[in-house]
Image (cartoon, rainbow, N blue to C red):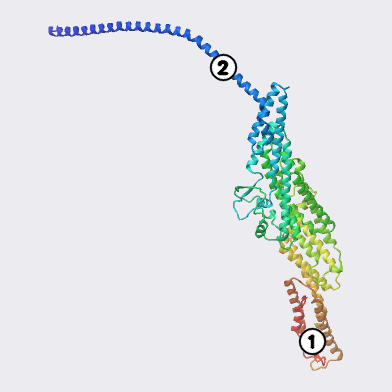
Amino acid sequence: MIPTEDASARKKEIEEKLKQEQETLSFIRENLEKSDQLTKGMVSILSSFESRLMQLENSIIPVHKQTENLQRLQENVDKTLSCMDHVISYYHVAKDTDRIIREGPTGRLAEYLSCIAKIQKAVEYFQDNNPDSPELNTVKARFEKGKELLEAEFRNLLTRYSKPVPPILILDALTVDDELEVQEEVMLEHLPEAVLQDIICISGWLVEYGRNQDFMNVYFQIRSNQLDRSIKGLKDHFRKNSASSGVLYSPAVQTKRKDTPTKKAPKRPVYISDHDPRVKHHSDALNEKHGAASGKDDVLDIEIDSYIHCISAFVKLAQSEYALLTEIIPEHHQKKTFDSLIQEALDNLMLEGDNIVSAARRAIMRHDYSAVLTIFPILKHLKNSKSDFDSTLQGTAASTKNKLPTLITSMESIGAKALEEFADSIKNDPDKEYNMPKDGTVHELTSNAILFLQQLLDFHETAGAMLASQETSSSASSYSSEFSKRLLSTYICKVLGNLQLNLLSKSKVYEDSALSAIFLHNNYNYILKSLEKSDLIALVKVTQKKAEVSYRELIEQQIQMYQRSWFRVTEHLTDRNMPVIQPYNKLKDKERQVIKDKFKGFNDGLEELCKTQKGWAIPDKEQRDFIRQAQKRVVSEGYRAFLHRCANIQFTKNPEKYHKYRPEQVEDMIERLFDTSA
């Protein structure tokens, strides 16, 4: 059972909570009533605001629509006025642009093109809207006049600023300095940059708006003339500056091989001006650097080097012209225009090459085969330049591309003919007595033949390919360098064989067999030494391994033939017919006469041979000394032995009459053989 005190305390607590809840409920009710009142007031206000807005909207919308209509009307009026002004401006274009068009585009190209654009728009307007109006004819005429003046400006700019490239700049562009690791490539700027941009601008307008391609003909004619003048200027430079100071360098020698690794060179643009202070001293600098050629025909070498330089210059200048052309001429017209541009210069070079071939052909007809050698350095350079030519002429007509190969073929053909006829001329050179060297020295035919072959050695690859080009066999159609090398070796051996046969025939002109032997000895020795000295022997050995041995055997045979001439001297020193000498026995007259005859025969033979052979010549000191020593040894030994046998024989009362020479004197006489100055 719950105690009474606790129950009353609990009841009191509940009553207090109930009272608090009632008070809270009463507060909530009062707030709800206030909220309802506020809500009703707000709804009333919003309803009133909505009503007023509707009234305002009903009043404003008509006004707004009226305003929009007014604005639209205003805009239409403005547009109409603007269109009227625009249309009216077309009627004034001819008058507004008259002064600028008449004065031309010079010095104000941008303003001029702007006027042309206005005229063009006027033409389009009248064509579309009023094709029968007189204004159309006016603006059309003005447009054509403007186009003509632009074409004239294009021509004038090109003519005024296009100059031949000075030889100094061409040679700079061709020169390669072996001492520089990084080569500086010289770029030729044919036109000032500002002028070039104007020309490009005019060209672009003429193509896009002028519908005119005549300016391309103007372009190639002017630039073609400058290209040709540049090459002719280089040629004149060679003739003027090389005549007094020697032959200038050859690009075939100075230019690096293509497979030589080098760093890419920075490009150095050089503008072509009328006056370059370096031109005056260029030749001196070149000759100081490269030296003058010696032992050559200056005029001939100048012509060769000049043509070689002109070929290289053409490639360099043509490449430069193509680079310029690509900036001015539309892409689909570039190859055709370039083809036309280079024709005159290329034709002149090919004509000059044909003249060289014709000159070589005439030289062959008069048997001047050394003159034919002029085509070898040229042909070598042409073949070395062919890849650059092909690259430069890529895209041109087939007739243009074939010009260089045709010239190369002509040169190879005439060169091969010259080689063949030269070999035949060596074989068939007549044995003319008056043309034979009186002292038995080297014949002119031998020296000329060896000189020809030595010069051929400088162009052995060209000569070998030249011979191979004439082969009709299947193996020759794809000939290699080894094949052409064997052909050249065979050819050289053929020439040497023909020379040997001819020399043998010529030697028979001499009545004295000893002089004939000296003649053959000198010529064989000269051939061998020349082959060894010039490295021709290496080419000969390609097909004749024992060539040196063969020539040495021939030389030795001729020495032996010569030595036989002394038998008529030394035969008197032998024991043949020599009387048997008994001590204290007196010689018979017949026996004394035998000894006298031996002395006399020796003395007369020695004097005669020494007198005759002293006028003969052996140019090779080594061979001359060898033959003298060998002969001194044979004669001296035999003479000393003979004197020893006759030492105690009384065969005459005047021994000094027969014993004319001491052995030392005999040796001295032999020592003076082959000495024309003695």
**Residue 254 vertical placement versus 135 (above, below):** below
Which residue is nearer to you in this view: 224 or 312?
224
**Residue 23 vertical placement versus 555 (above, below):** above
* Element under disc 1: loop
* Element under disc 2: helix
Q: Amino acid at mark 2?
A: Gln
Residue at mark 1 to residue at mark 2: CA–CA distance: 149 Å
What residue is drawn where x is 76% and y is 85%?
A: 662
Q: In the rendered image, is residue 544 in sight? A: no
Q: Amino acid at mark 1?
A: Lys
Image mark count: 2
* Residue position for label 1: 660
Which mark is nearer the camera, 1 or 2?
Answer: 2
Q: Position of residue 124 (x, y in %)?
A: 68, 25
* Residue position for label 2: 74
What residue is drawn where x is 65% and y is 23%?
A: 88
Q: In the rendered image, is residue 88 in sight? A: yes
User: Is the residue under label 2 in contact with that under label 1 (CB below 8 Å)?
Assistant: no
Q: Quadrant of residue 204?
A: top right
Q: Position of residue 617 (x, y in %)?
A: 78, 73
Q: Quadrant of residue 434?
A: bottom right
- How many neighbours does mark 1 have within 10 angstroms: few (below 14), some (14-19), or many (20 or more)? few
